[in-house]
Amino acid sequence: MKNNNFKCIEFDDDKKQLKILIGTEGIIPYDQIEKVSVLNEDAKFREKSVPFSHQVLGGTTFYTFFGGPGMYVGLKIVLKDKTVKAAYISDRITGINTDIYREDVEEAQEIKKMIDKRISRTL
């Protein structure tokens, strides 16, 4: 993906800020961002606790007869004041190693690269 807007985030390079559309909605100036991580949030805790405080680790996971834990792929955005924001890539519950999961992780990594590039310019 080579555009500057995604379903969860819009970039405004003129104003040097991004807008979260899905997750912790709002506008964040690039110079307030300290760190961005691609993570999986346990679906049971989405919007019920601090974003990504309940993570599902990729790779080896505990699976039951009914499959692995449901989750949302997203970006954990930590601001310089230590506030945590979330931008969710997944618009539906997914599981490890599904096609949807792989597509969402790929998109999240692309967005992370774009944010990292922008915040490195503000240092």
Image (tube, helix red, strand yellow):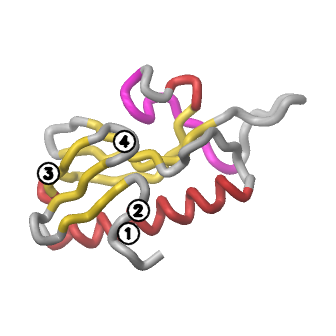
- Name the residue carrying label 3: 32
- Return the residue at label 2: 6
In the rendered structure, the answer to whether residue 32 lies left or right of residue 50 reads left
Which of label 1 and label 2 is nearer to you?
A: 2
Under circle 4, the secondary element is strand
Q: Which residue is labeled 4 in the image?
A: 86
Horizontal and vertical percent for residue 45?
51, 24
Principal secondary structure, stretch drawn in magenta: loop
State which tag comes first along the sequence, 2 or 3: 2
- Tell me which label, 1 or 4, sits earlier in the chain: 4
Identify the residue position indicated by label 1 in the image. Answer: 113
Instruction: Classify mark 3: residues with Cα within 10 Å, few (<14), some (14-19) or many (20+).
Output: some
Residue 105 shown left or right of residue 65 in the figure: left
Within the magenta stretch, is there residue 56?
yes
Cα gap from disc 3 to disc 4, whole angstroms: 14 Å
Single out the mark in the foreground, 1 or 4.
Answer: 4
Residue 116 or residue 6, whichever sits in front: 6
Provide the residue span drawn in magenta. Answer: 49-59
Residue at 67% over, 34% down: 70
Q: In the figure, is residue 66 to the left or right of 47?
A: right
Name the residue located 60 percent from the left edge and 41 percent from the top edge: 92
